[in-house]
Structure formats: structure tokens, C-alpha cells
Image (spheres, grey):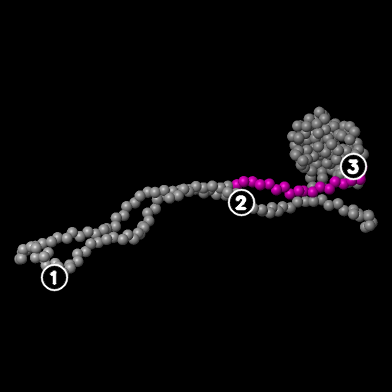
Amino acid sequence: MIAIDVIPTVLGHTVYDSSHKKLGKIDQVYVDETTGQPEWMTVNTGLFGTKETFVPLEPAEVQGDDVVVPFQKDQIKDAPMVEAEAEGRLSEQDEIRLYEYYGMSTEHGVASGTTHAGTEKRSAVGRDTSGSTTNDAMTRSEERLRVGKETRETGRVHLRKYVVTEEEQRTVPVRKEKVRVEREPITDENADRATSGPEISDEEHEVVLHEERPVAATETVPVERVRMSKETDVEDETVRGKVRKERIDTEGLPKDTQN
């Protein structure tokens, strides 16, 4: 078991399983309130260390800067998800669940069905930023806004052909024949033609009249071709988002030494 005085040196260090596969970093250590002995540690696992998993400290060993536990990585990743209570303590029920999951007896301070004074819950030991786990440098991080693009459908356009009937008007010149009666007196010049027939007789002349009439007919002729094509316009759009950035200030330095 890791001793209480070793806690400040292991907080933040990396934990490995029995096959020496990396699990994550130690975030917190829970100790027995009565004996002060460390019994549980939380390890940041999962994607980007977003999951906090409880691992027993009794079988853990410190090997240099690393902590090794006799469990497999998959077993630890699937451990029950428990959360400390508001005062930073681990409840008796959650502790029993963890002991049973890791196949350990409950004689380490919690007996099934009973409660021992001072051992019902465990207190969390926080990470001391001024202790030996820090060095002379501090890493500043910040979030960056990542902008991407997605294509979505905005509408559909169809070409459809249909027939409509419209009335059109055209002006066409037409010719019509009319009868005009002309009378001319008998003169020496036309006397021979005028007296060539009988002196007195019945006579009839016929003149056929004609006229033009407008006639309308239709014919089908191609007038144009219609097609659809696509063109792309490029526009600039502004994307806004909030990002968090860490800032580092110095305290206690003379103003003339600050950059």
C-alpha cells in the first residue's frame, strides 16, 4: 500500500495496468478518516481524460515515477461509475460496490451489513499546487475555434413543359372586285363598234366578281432550346464562437522585472 507521505509525490503521475498499459493520471487520493491510510485513487481515463475512475491503492506499487496496479486496463475502464458526495467523501455503498467489482474482500474498513465508526466514508486528498508535484514552469493553454463547412440541400428546380392556347392577331391585305358602270357617248371613233350589232335587241352581259378572304392555319416550328445548369457563387460568411484562454499573471515581482 502507498503510504500517506507518498501521496504528494504520486498525484498527477501516470498509472499503468498489470501489462504496463497506460491508464491515465492520478487526480485524487481517498484516505481512511480514522487511520489516515490511502485506500482509493481516482484515475483520469477515457478520451482526453474526461472519465474519473476509482482504483484501489492497497495492491498498487510505486515504480519510479509510475504507479502500477495488478488489474487489466479493460477491467479498470469498466469499473462502476461513482461520485464523491458534496463534502468530498465516498459513501459506504459505493465503496462496497468497488471492493466487490475488483474482487477484494470488504475487511479493509467496510464490513458488509455493518458500519465501523470512522470508516463509513473516505475523505479526498486534493492536489497541492505548491508541493513537490510542480516545477518552475506553468503550461498555458487556450481553446481554438475550428471552423468547418457542411453541404445541405436548399431547394430543387424542375423544368416542366406544358401547352397553353393564346389568341394571336394578324393584319392581311385582301382584294375585292367591284362592278363599275361606265357610260360613254357615241362618237365618230366608237360609232362602228356601237352599231356592229342589231339595231334593236335584247342583250345580257355577265361579269364575275372575285374577292380574297384571309385564311388561318397553324404549323409547328421549333423556336428555342431550354436547359438548366448550375453555377456556384462564393460568399464570405462570419462564424463566431466563444473560446476560453488561460492567462498567467505574476505576483510578488517588481514592476520593472515584469514583461
| Stretch in magenta | 131-152
Residue name at image x 37 percent, y 56 percent: 166
Give the Cα separation between the discs numbered 3 and 1.
149 Å
Q: Residues within 10 Å of mark 1 (few under 14, many from 20)?
A: few
Residue 212 spot, x, y in % from top left? 26, 58
Image quadrant in which the C terminus is located: bottom right
Q: Is residue 239 left or right of residue 204?
A: right
Circle count: 3
Name the N-terminal-most of marks 2 and 3: 3
Residue name at image x 5 percent, y 65 percent: 199
Tell me the kind of residue under disc 1: Thr
Q: Secondary structure at mark 1?
A: loop
Is 148 colored magenta in this rendering?
yes
Tell me the kind of residue under disc 3: Thr
Q: Residue furthest front?
A: 188
Give the Cα separation between the discs numbered 2 and 3.
56 Å
Asked if residue 117 can be seen in this view, the reply is no
Residue name at image x 79 percent, y 51 percent: 245
Name the N-terminal-most of marks 3 and 1: 3
Q: Is residue 220 left or right of residue 99?
A: left
Kindly report which numbered mark, 2 or 1, lies closer to the viewer in this rendering: 1
Asked if residue 166 can be seen in this view, the reply is yes
The residue at which mark 2 appears reads as 233
Q: Secondary structure at mark 2?
A: loop
Tell me the kind of residue under disc 2: Asp
Kindly report which numbered mark, 2 or 3, lies closer to the viewer in this rendering: 2
Image quadrant in which the N terminus is located: top right
Q: Of residues 95 and 238, which is closer to you in this image?
A: 238
The residue at which mark 3 appears reads as 133
